[in-house]
Image (cartoon, rainbow, N blue to C red):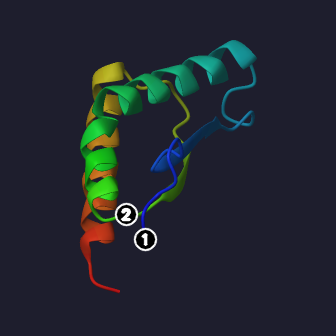
Amino acid sequence: MQLPAGDPPVQVGFTAASRHFPRAVDRNRVKRLGREAWRLQKQVLYDHLQQHSLQLAVFLIYTDKKIAPFSTLHHKISVILERLQKETSKPA
């Protein structure tokens, strides 16, 4: 099955609980850092999914009670991307 032109292979969403971050500015910072870490590394997963004509919808929930440094988020997002790639490579 060929993907329709213009449809992205992955839709991604981010959230942070207001219970852990009562101030909106902190929730927004966590989500912004997560989106940036995703943006910098997503191409490998995009290429893999396009090769296999797959699409994904991913929603990431930040559950820590403090804002992690960008380097930590960057590493964790890379682990998530590797796992998604591995899971989508398995035969059905």
The part of the image, by quadrant, that contains residue 89 is: bottom left
Total numbered labels: 2
Q: Residue at x 42, y 63 (%)?
A: 2
Q: Is residue 92 above or below residue 37?
A: below
Helix, strand or loop at mark 1: loop
| Whether residue 41 is visible | yes
Residue nearer the viewer, 1 or 76: 1
Residue under numbered circle 2: 53
- Quadrant in which the N terminus is drawn: bottom left
Mark 1 neighbour class, 10 Å CA radius: few under 14, some 14 to 19, many 20 or more? few
Residue designated by label 1: 1
Residue at image point 30% right, 30% down: 74
Going from the N terminus, do you reach mark 2 or mark 1 first? 1
Asked whether residue 61 is in view, the answer is no
> At 30% from the left edge and 65% from the top edge, which residue is drawn?
52
Label 2 close to label 1 by CB (< 8 Å):
yes
Crowdedness near tag 2: few (<14), some (14–19) or many (≥20) residues, C-alpha within 10 Å: few
Report the amino acid beneath label 2. Answer: Ser
